[in-house]
Amino acid sequence: MVAYFFTILELSAPLVSTIGQNSKEAKKQVSFVGCKVPSVCPLTHSYGTIHQNPFVHIHVFYEGDAWIVSNNKQTQGVRTVWWEDDASGAVVCLLDQSLLPQEVVYLRLKHEQEVADAIRALKVRGAPAIGVTAAFGLALSIRRLIQEQDGSLSLSAAQQHVHAVGELLSETRPTAVNLFWAIERMLHCADVAINNHASLQDLAHLLQAEAQSIADEDFDACMAMGNYGAELIADGDTLLTHCNAGALATAGWGTALAPMYVAHKAGKRIHVFVDETRPVLQGSRLTTWELQQEGIPLTLITDSMVGHFMRLGGIKAVFVGADRVAANGDVANKIGTYSVAVLAHAHQIPFYVAAPSSTIDLDIPSGEYIPIEQRNLEEVTSVRGIAIAPAGIRAANPAFDVTPHAYITAIITERGIIHSPYEEGLRRVIMDLRYHN
Protein backbone atom coordinates (compact mmCIF):
# COMPACT_ATOMS: atom_id res chain seq x y z
CA MET A 1 0.00 0.00 0.00
CA VAL A 2 1.64 3.27 -1.13
CA ALA A 3 0.41 6.82 -0.64
CA TYR A 4 1.97 9.95 -2.12
CA PHE A 5 1.44 13.57 -1.10
CA PHE A 6 1.50 16.39 -3.66
CA THR A 7 1.93 20.09 -3.03
CA ILE A 8 0.34 22.43 -5.54
CA LEU A 9 2.68 25.26 -6.50
CA GLU A 10 0.70 27.46 -8.88
CA LEU A 11 -2.41 27.53 -11.02
CA SER A 12 -2.55 28.98 -14.50
CA ALA A 13 -6.31 29.34 -14.06
CA PRO A 14 -8.61 28.85 -11.08
CA LEU A 15 -9.72 25.29 -10.52
CA VAL A 16 -13.51 25.21 -10.46
CA SER A 17 -16.09 22.48 -10.07
CA THR A 18 -16.86 20.49 -13.18
CA ILE A 19 -19.55 18.36 -11.60
CA GLY A 20 -22.32 17.96 -14.11
CA GLN A 21 -20.09 19.10 -16.98
CA ASN A 22 -18.31 17.07 -19.60
CA SER A 23 -14.56 16.98 -20.03
CA LYS A 24 -14.63 19.55 -22.88
CA GLU A 25 -16.06 22.13 -20.52
CA ALA A 26 -13.48 21.22 -17.92
CA LYS A 27 -10.66 21.68 -20.43
CA LYS A 28 -11.83 25.23 -21.12
CA GLN A 29 -11.44 26.10 -17.46
CA VAL A 30 -8.11 24.53 -16.47
CA SER A 31 -4.91 24.40 -18.49
CA PHE A 32 -2.20 23.08 -16.20
CA VAL A 33 -1.03 22.96 -12.63
CA GLY A 34 2.58 22.87 -11.48
CA CYS A 35 3.23 20.59 -8.55
CA LYS A 36 6.04 19.33 -6.35
CA VAL A 37 6.46 15.56 -6.28
CA PRO A 38 8.36 13.71 -3.55
CA SER A 39 11.84 12.64 -4.68
CA VAL A 40 11.02 9.06 -3.69
CA CYS A 41 8.19 8.85 -6.22
CA PRO A 42 9.22 5.84 -8.32
CA LEU A 43 7.23 6.44 -11.49
CA THR A 44 8.65 8.22 -14.52
CA HIS A 45 5.55 8.35 -16.69
CA SER A 46 1.81 8.81 -16.13
CA TYR A 47 1.36 8.66 -12.38
CA GLY A 48 -2.02 9.35 -10.88
CA THR A 49 -4.47 11.96 -9.72
CA ILE A 50 -4.39 14.92 -7.36
CA HIS A 51 -7.00 17.44 -6.32
CA GLN A 52 -7.15 21.12 -5.56
CA ASN A 53 -10.92 20.91 -5.92
CA PRO A 54 -12.33 17.39 -5.46
CA PHE A 55 -14.70 17.78 -8.39
CA VAL A 56 -11.82 18.40 -10.81
CA HIS A 57 -9.50 15.52 -11.61
CA ILE A 58 -6.05 16.18 -12.98
CA HIS A 59 -3.52 13.52 -13.91
CA VAL A 60 0.20 13.87 -13.25
CA PHE A 61 2.84 13.07 -15.85
CA TYR A 62 6.55 13.71 -16.32
CA GLU A 63 7.74 16.00 -19.11
CA GLY A 64 11.34 17.05 -19.46
CA ASP A 65 12.62 18.15 -16.06
CA ALA A 66 9.22 18.89 -14.51
CA TRP A 67 6.16 17.08 -13.29
CA ILE A 68 3.10 18.57 -14.98
CA VAL A 69 -0.55 18.10 -14.10
CA SER A 70 -2.63 17.63 -17.22
CA ASN A 71 -6.36 18.09 -17.52
CA ASN A 72 -6.63 15.70 -20.46
CA LYS A 73 -8.12 12.91 -18.36
CA GLN A 74 -10.55 14.78 -16.19
CA THR A 75 -13.56 12.93 -14.85
CA GLN A 76 -16.72 14.09 -13.15
CA GLY A 77 -17.43 13.98 -9.44
CA VAL A 78 -15.21 13.16 -6.50
CA ARG A 79 -13.07 10.22 -7.54
CA THR A 80 -13.62 7.75 -4.74
CA VAL A 81 -12.41 4.45 -6.19
CA TRP A 82 -11.17 3.34 -9.59
CA TRP A 83 -9.01 0.81 -11.45
CA GLU A 84 -5.61 1.46 -12.97
CA ASP A 85 -2.89 -0.55 -14.69
CA ASP A 86 0.72 0.50 -14.25
CA ALA A 87 4.11 -1.00 -15.05
CA SER A 88 3.93 -3.37 -12.09
CA GLY A 89 0.39 -4.58 -12.73
CA ALA A 90 -3.18 -3.77 -11.74
CA VAL A 91 -4.05 -1.52 -8.80
CA VAL A 92 -7.24 -0.43 -7.08
CA CYS A 93 -6.98 3.28 -6.33
CA LEU A 94 -9.05 4.96 -3.66
CA LEU A 95 -9.26 8.18 -1.71
CA ASP A 96 -8.43 7.53 1.96
CA GLN A 97 -11.52 9.00 3.60
CA SER A 98 -10.24 8.33 7.10
CA LEU A 99 -7.82 11.26 6.70
CA LEU A 100 -10.25 13.84 5.32
CA PRO A 101 -10.55 16.78 5.48
CA GLN A 102 -7.05 17.49 6.81
CA GLU A 103 -5.26 15.35 4.22
CA VAL A 104 -6.16 14.29 0.69
CA VAL A 105 -4.32 11.02 0.16
CA TYR A 106 -4.82 8.37 -2.50
CA LEU A 107 -3.99 4.73 -1.86
CA ARG A 108 -2.85 2.28 -4.54
CA LEU A 109 -3.83 -1.22 -3.44
CA LYS A 110 -2.20 -4.23 -5.09
CA HIS A 111 -3.59 -7.08 -2.99
CA GLU A 112 -7.13 -8.13 -2.11
CA GLN A 113 -6.23 -8.18 1.60
CA GLU A 114 -5.39 -4.49 1.36
CA VAL A 115 -8.79 -3.90 -0.23
CA ALA A 116 -10.55 -5.78 2.57
CA ASP A 117 -8.58 -3.88 5.20
CA ALA A 118 -9.47 -0.54 3.56
CA ILE A 119 -13.19 -1.37 3.64
CA ARG A 120 -13.07 -2.51 7.26
CA ALA A 121 -11.07 0.55 8.38
CA LEU A 122 -13.46 3.02 6.67
CA LYS A 123 -10.79 4.21 4.28
CA VAL A 124 -13.56 3.71 1.76
CA ARG A 125 -17.16 3.79 2.99
CA GLY A 126 -20.70 4.32 1.78
CA ALA A 127 -22.74 1.34 0.61
CA PRO A 128 -22.40 1.85 -3.18
CA ALA A 129 -18.67 2.66 -2.92
CA ILE A 130 -18.07 -0.43 -0.81
CA GLY A 131 -19.73 -2.59 -3.46
CA VAL A 132 -17.66 -1.05 -6.25
CA THR A 133 -14.46 -1.44 -4.22
CA ALA A 134 -15.19 -5.10 -3.49
CA ALA A 135 -15.83 -5.74 -7.19
CA PHE A 136 -12.50 -4.17 -8.14
CA GLY A 137 -10.85 -6.14 -5.32
CA LEU A 138 -12.09 -9.43 -6.77
CA ALA A 139 -10.87 -8.47 -10.25
CA LEU A 140 -7.54 -7.44 -8.76
CA SER A 141 -7.13 -10.76 -6.95
CA ILE A 142 -7.30 -12.87 -10.10
CA ARG A 143 -4.94 -10.54 -12.00
CA ARG A 144 -2.45 -10.76 -9.15
CA LEU A 145 -2.68 -14.55 -8.94
CA ILE A 146 -2.22 -15.04 -12.69
CA GLN A 147 0.83 -12.78 -12.64
CA GLU A 148 2.38 -14.49 -9.62
CA GLN A 149 1.83 -18.08 -10.74
CA ASP A 150 2.96 -17.38 -14.30
CA GLY A 151 1.28 -20.15 -16.27
CA SER A 152 0.91 -22.76 -13.54
CA LEU A 153 -2.58 -21.68 -12.44
CA SER A 154 -5.52 -23.93 -13.38
CA LEU A 155 -9.09 -22.79 -13.96
CA SER A 156 -10.34 -24.82 -10.99
CA ALA A 157 -7.71 -23.23 -8.72
CA ALA A 158 -8.68 -19.81 -10.05
CA GLN A 159 -12.33 -20.51 -9.25
CA GLN A 160 -11.50 -21.59 -5.71
CA HIS A 161 -9.39 -18.48 -5.26
CA VAL A 162 -12.09 -16.09 -6.47
CA HIS A 163 -14.67 -17.63 -4.13
CA ALA A 164 -12.24 -17.45 -1.20
CA VAL A 165 -11.65 -13.76 -1.92
CA GLY A 166 -15.40 -13.24 -2.12
CA GLU A 167 -15.67 -14.72 1.37
CA LEU A 168 -12.82 -12.49 2.61
CA LEU A 169 -14.50 -9.35 1.32
CA SER A 170 -17.97 -10.33 2.52
CA GLU A 171 -16.67 -10.51 6.10
CA THR A 172 -15.58 -6.86 6.17
CA ARG A 173 -18.93 -5.15 6.90
CA PRO A 174 -22.30 -6.88 7.43
CA THR A 175 -24.96 -4.19 6.93
CA ALA A 176 -24.42 -2.66 3.47
CA VAL A 177 -26.14 -5.03 1.07
CA ASN A 178 -24.37 -3.46 -1.93
CA LEU A 179 -21.25 -5.30 -0.78
CA PHE A 180 -22.89 -8.73 -1.03
CA TRP A 181 -24.75 -7.81 -4.21
CA ALA A 182 -21.50 -6.85 -5.95
CA ILE A 183 -19.64 -9.93 -4.72
CA GLU A 184 -22.43 -12.24 -5.85
CA ARG A 185 -22.49 -10.59 -9.26
CA MET A 186 -18.73 -10.94 -9.65
CA LEU A 187 -18.73 -14.60 -8.55
CA HIS A 188 -21.53 -15.37 -11.00
CA CYS A 189 -19.50 -13.74 -13.79
CA ALA A 190 -16.47 -15.86 -12.83
CA ASP A 191 -18.45 -19.10 -12.61
CA VAL A 192 -20.09 -18.60 -16.00
CA ALA A 193 -16.73 -17.85 -17.63
CA ILE A 194 -15.05 -20.86 -16.04
CA ASN A 195 -17.93 -23.19 -16.88
CA ASN A 196 -17.56 -22.05 -20.49
CA HIS A 197 -13.84 -22.93 -20.34
CA ALA A 198 -12.60 -19.35 -20.71
CA SER A 199 -8.87 -18.81 -20.68
CA LEU A 200 -7.32 -17.29 -17.57
CA GLN A 201 -6.64 -14.07 -19.44
CA ASP A 202 -10.25 -13.92 -20.61
CA LEU A 203 -11.42 -14.59 -17.05
CA ALA A 204 -9.32 -11.68 -15.75
CA HIS A 205 -10.61 -9.42 -18.51
CA LEU A 206 -14.24 -10.38 -17.89
CA LEU A 207 -13.97 -9.75 -14.15
CA GLN A 208 -12.32 -6.39 -14.67
CA ALA A 209 -15.03 -5.43 -17.19
CA GLU A 210 -17.79 -6.56 -14.82
CA ALA A 211 -16.33 -4.53 -11.96
CA GLN A 212 -16.11 -1.49 -14.20
CA SER A 213 -19.73 -2.03 -15.25
CA ILE A 214 -20.76 -2.01 -11.58
CA ALA A 215 -18.95 1.30 -11.13
CA ASP A 216 -20.41 2.81 -14.31
CA GLU A 217 -23.92 1.72 -13.41
CA ASP A 218 -23.57 3.34 -10.00
CA PHE A 219 -22.48 6.59 -11.64
CA ASP A 220 -25.57 6.49 -13.87
CA ALA A 221 -27.81 5.66 -10.92
CA CYS A 222 -26.49 8.67 -9.01
CA MET A 223 -27.24 10.92 -11.96
CA ALA A 224 -30.79 9.59 -12.20
CA MET A 225 -31.45 9.89 -8.46
CA GLY A 226 -30.13 13.43 -8.59
CA ASN A 227 -32.52 14.39 -11.35
CA TYR A 228 -35.53 12.77 -9.68
CA GLY A 229 -34.72 14.12 -6.24
CA ALA A 230 -34.04 17.67 -7.44
CA GLU A 231 -37.72 17.93 -8.37
CA LEU A 232 -38.49 17.71 -4.64
CA ILE A 233 -36.34 20.77 -3.88
CA ALA A 234 -37.68 24.30 -4.30
CA ASP A 235 -35.69 27.47 -4.80
CA GLY A 236 -34.77 28.86 -1.40
CA ASP A 237 -35.14 25.58 0.51
CA THR A 238 -33.15 24.79 3.62
CA LEU A 239 -32.41 21.07 3.75
CA LEU A 240 -30.88 18.70 6.29
CA THR A 241 -28.76 15.61 5.78
CA HIS A 242 -27.16 13.03 8.06
CA CYS A 243 -23.82 11.22 7.61
CA ASN A 244 -22.29 11.35 4.13
CA ALA A 245 -24.26 10.14 1.14
CA GLY A 246 -22.44 12.16 -1.48
CA ALA A 247 -19.80 11.50 -4.10
CA LEU A 248 -17.47 10.09 -1.44
CA ALA A 249 -19.99 7.30 -0.76
CA THR A 250 -20.48 6.26 -4.39
CA ALA A 251 -18.87 6.01 -7.81
CA GLY A 252 -20.85 9.07 -8.93
CA TRP A 253 -22.45 12.19 -7.46
CA GLY A 254 -23.87 10.44 -4.43
CA THR A 255 -27.33 9.38 -3.35
CA ALA A 256 -28.79 11.90 -0.87
CA LEU A 257 -26.49 14.72 -2.00
CA ALA A 258 -27.05 14.16 -5.73
CA PRO A 259 -30.43 15.99 -5.72
CA MET A 260 -28.75 18.92 -3.97
CA TYR A 261 -25.99 19.07 -6.58
CA VAL A 262 -28.52 18.97 -9.42
CA ALA A 263 -30.70 21.62 -7.78
CA HIS A 264 -27.65 23.83 -7.17
CA LYS A 265 -26.49 23.45 -10.76
CA ALA A 266 -29.99 24.39 -11.94
CA GLY A 267 -29.68 27.69 -10.09
CA LYS A 268 -31.84 26.87 -7.09
CA ARG A 269 -30.67 28.63 -3.96
CA ILE A 270 -30.37 26.04 -1.20
CA HIS A 271 -28.82 25.86 2.24
CA VAL A 272 -27.90 22.54 3.85
CA PHE A 273 -27.79 21.75 7.56
CA VAL A 274 -25.26 18.94 8.10
CA ASP A 275 -25.36 16.70 11.18
CA GLU A 276 -21.84 16.04 12.44
CA THR A 277 -22.77 12.32 12.71
CA ARG A 278 -21.12 10.88 15.78
CA PRO A 279 -19.10 8.86 16.45
CA VAL A 280 -16.96 8.88 13.27
CA LEU A 281 -18.08 12.37 12.15
CA GLN A 282 -18.83 11.60 8.52
CA GLY A 283 -21.03 14.68 8.37
CA SER A 284 -18.51 17.16 9.70
CA ARG A 285 -15.47 15.61 8.00
CA LEU A 286 -16.87 14.50 4.66
CA THR A 287 -20.24 16.07 3.79
CA THR A 288 -19.15 19.58 4.71
CA TRP A 289 -15.97 19.08 2.67
CA GLU A 290 -17.96 18.05 -0.39
CA LEU A 291 -20.55 20.82 -0.12
CA GLN A 292 -17.92 23.47 0.57
CA GLN A 293 -15.94 22.48 -2.52
CA GLU A 294 -19.10 22.69 -4.60
CA GLY A 295 -19.99 26.11 -3.23
CA ILE A 296 -23.26 25.08 -1.57
CA PRO A 297 -24.01 27.11 1.58
CA LEU A 298 -24.08 24.92 4.69
CA THR A 299 -24.35 24.95 8.45
CA LEU A 300 -22.69 22.24 10.53
CA ILE A 301 -24.63 21.22 13.65
CA THR A 302 -24.24 18.59 16.32
CA ASP A 303 -26.63 15.64 16.13
CA SER A 304 -28.44 16.85 19.24
CA MET A 305 -29.36 20.18 17.58
CA VAL A 306 -31.64 18.66 14.93
CA GLY A 307 -34.88 19.00 16.92
CA HIS A 308 -34.09 22.61 17.86
CA PHE A 309 -33.64 23.73 14.27
CA MET A 310 -36.65 21.77 13.05
CA ARG A 311 -38.82 23.43 15.69
CA LEU A 312 -37.71 26.86 14.44
CA GLY A 313 -39.40 26.02 11.16
CA GLY A 314 -36.71 26.69 8.61
CA ILE A 315 -35.87 23.15 7.47
CA LYS A 316 -38.06 22.11 4.53
CA ALA A 317 -36.89 18.53 3.87
CA VAL A 318 -34.46 15.84 5.01
CA PHE A 319 -32.41 13.78 2.52
CA VAL A 320 -30.47 10.70 3.67
CA GLY A 321 -28.90 7.66 2.02
CA ALA A 322 -29.26 3.99 2.94
CA ASP A 323 -27.13 0.92 3.50
CA ARG A 324 -30.01 -1.52 3.08
CA VAL A 325 -33.68 -1.17 2.19
CA ALA A 326 -35.91 -4.05 3.32
CA ALA A 327 -38.79 -5.34 1.21
CA ASN A 328 -41.35 -3.39 3.25
CA GLY A 329 -39.47 -0.09 2.93
CA ASP A 330 -37.71 -0.10 6.31
CA VAL A 331 -34.27 1.47 5.92
CA ALA A 332 -30.95 0.81 7.65
CA ASN A 333 -28.68 3.83 7.58
CA LYS A 334 -25.98 5.46 9.70
CA ILE A 335 -26.72 5.51 13.42
CA GLY A 336 -28.82 8.56 14.29
CA THR A 337 -30.94 8.43 11.13
CA TYR A 338 -33.90 6.99 13.03
CA SER A 339 -33.83 9.88 15.51
CA VAL A 340 -33.79 12.40 12.65
CA ALA A 341 -36.75 10.62 11.01
CA VAL A 342 -38.79 10.69 14.22
CA LEU A 343 -38.09 14.40 14.65
CA ALA A 344 -38.97 15.12 11.02
CA HIS A 345 -42.24 13.22 11.46
CA ALA A 346 -43.05 15.19 14.62
CA HIS A 347 -42.47 18.48 12.80
CA GLN A 348 -44.22 17.37 9.57
CA ILE A 349 -41.04 17.70 7.51
CA PRO A 350 -40.66 15.40 4.47
CA PHE A 351 -38.07 12.67 5.04
CA TYR A 352 -36.57 11.31 1.80
CA VAL A 353 -34.29 8.29 1.39
CA ALA A 354 -32.13 8.09 -1.75
CA ALA A 355 -30.95 4.58 -2.59
CA PRO A 356 -30.01 2.78 -5.82
CA SER A 357 -31.54 -0.59 -6.66
CA SER A 358 -28.35 -2.32 -5.45
CA THR A 359 -29.30 -1.22 -1.91
CA ILE A 360 -32.75 -2.86 -2.08
CA ASP A 361 -32.89 -6.29 -0.44
CA LEU A 362 -36.16 -8.04 -1.19
CA ASP A 363 -34.96 -11.11 0.72
CA ILE A 364 -35.20 -9.15 3.98
CA PRO A 365 -38.91 -8.75 4.85
CA SER A 366 -38.46 -5.89 7.32
CA GLY A 367 -35.86 -3.87 9.15
CA GLU A 368 -35.79 -6.08 12.21
CA TYR A 369 -33.97 -8.72 10.15
CA ILE A 370 -31.22 -6.40 8.90
CA PRO A 371 -27.86 -7.25 10.55
CA ILE A 372 -26.44 -4.24 12.38
CA GLU A 373 -22.67 -3.84 12.45
CA GLN A 374 -21.12 -3.37 15.89
CA ARG A 375 -17.89 -1.41 15.64
CA ASN A 376 -14.89 -0.79 17.90
CA LEU A 377 -15.92 0.92 21.14
CA GLU A 378 -12.93 3.26 20.90
CA GLU A 379 -14.79 5.13 18.17
CA VAL A 380 -17.18 6.27 20.92
CA THR A 381 -14.74 6.77 23.79
CA SER A 382 -12.21 8.71 21.73
CA VAL A 383 -12.07 11.12 18.80
CA ARG A 384 -9.19 10.64 16.40
CA GLY A 385 -7.13 8.89 19.03
CA ILE A 386 -7.84 11.37 21.84
CA ALA A 387 -9.77 9.90 24.78
CA ILE A 388 -12.96 11.79 25.67
CA ALA A 389 -14.24 9.38 28.34
CA PRO A 390 -12.75 7.77 31.46
CA ALA A 391 -10.79 4.58 30.90
CA GLY A 392 -12.61 1.32 31.51
CA ILE A 393 -16.20 2.51 31.05
CA ARG A 394 -18.80 0.52 29.12
CA ALA A 395 -19.83 1.85 25.72
CA ALA A 396 -21.97 0.78 22.77
CA ASN A 397 -21.28 1.40 19.10
CA PRO A 398 -23.90 0.15 16.62
CA ALA A 399 -22.90 1.61 13.26
CA PHE A 400 -26.47 1.72 11.92
CA ASP A 401 -30.07 1.96 13.02
CA VAL A 402 -33.33 1.11 11.27
CA THR A 403 -35.94 3.69 10.30
CA PRO A 404 -39.42 2.14 9.94
CA HIS A 405 -41.09 2.86 6.62
CA ALA A 406 -43.91 4.75 8.35
CA TYR A 407 -41.50 7.66 8.94
CA ILE A 408 -40.31 7.79 5.30
CA THR A 409 -42.05 10.18 2.89
CA ALA A 410 -40.56 8.62 -0.26
CA ILE A 411 -37.63 6.52 -1.51
CA ILE A 412 -35.72 7.97 -4.46
CA THR A 413 -34.24 5.34 -6.81
CA GLU A 414 -32.67 5.49 -10.26
CA ARG A 415 -36.00 4.21 -11.65
CA GLY A 416 -38.12 6.90 -10.03
CA ILE A 417 -39.60 8.00 -6.71
CA ILE A 418 -41.44 5.37 -4.68
CA HIS A 419 -44.21 6.20 -2.23
CA SER A 420 -46.05 3.96 0.21
CA PRO A 421 -46.96 1.11 -0.10
CA TYR A 422 -43.25 0.45 -0.57
CA GLU A 423 -43.34 -3.31 -1.07
CA GLU A 424 -45.06 -2.98 -4.41
CA GLY A 425 -42.89 -0.11 -5.62
CA LEU A 426 -39.59 -1.66 -4.56
CA ARG A 427 -40.45 -4.96 -6.20
CA ARG A 428 -41.40 -3.13 -9.38
CA VAL A 429 -38.03 -1.36 -9.46
CA ILE A 430 -36.12 -4.63 -9.15
CA MET A 431 -38.26 -6.44 -11.73
CA ASP A 432 -37.93 -3.52 -14.14
CA LEU A 433 -34.15 -3.58 -13.86
CA ARG A 434 -34.00 -7.33 -14.37
CA TYR A 435 -36.17 -6.99 -17.47
CA HIS A 436 -33.97 -4.30 -19.01
CA ASN A 437 -30.76 -6.17 -18.16
Image: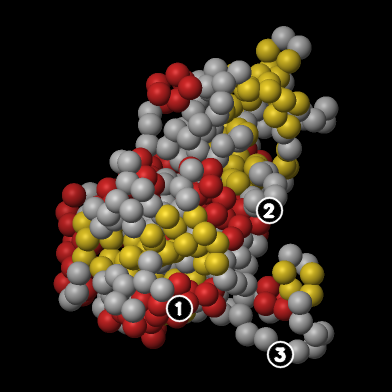
Q: Nearer the viewer, mark 3 or mark 1?
A: 1
Residue flagged by tag 3: what amino acid is it?
A: Arg
Q: Residue at x 21, y 65 (%)?
A: 418
Residue flagged by tag 2: what amino acid is it?
A: Leu
Q: Which mark is residue 394?
A: 3
The single residue placed furthest to the front in the displayed view is 312
Residue flagged by tag 1: what amino acid is it?
A: Gly
**Location of mark 2 (residue):** 99
**Location of mark 1 (residue):** 307
Instruction: Point out the tag, 3 or 1, that comes first from the N-terminus.
Output: 1
Instruction: Give x and y (percent) for residue 23.
Output: 42, 25
Q: Secondary structure at mark 1?
A: helix
Q: Residue at x 27, y 81 (%)?
A: 406
- Is residue 374 visible in the rendered image? The answer is yes
Instruction: Give x and y (percent) for residue 196.
Output: 35, 46
Seen in the picture, residue 19 relative to 160 is either above or below; the reply is: above
Mark 2 residue crowding within 10 angstroms, few (<14) / some (14–19) / many (20+): some
396 left or right, relative to 176? right
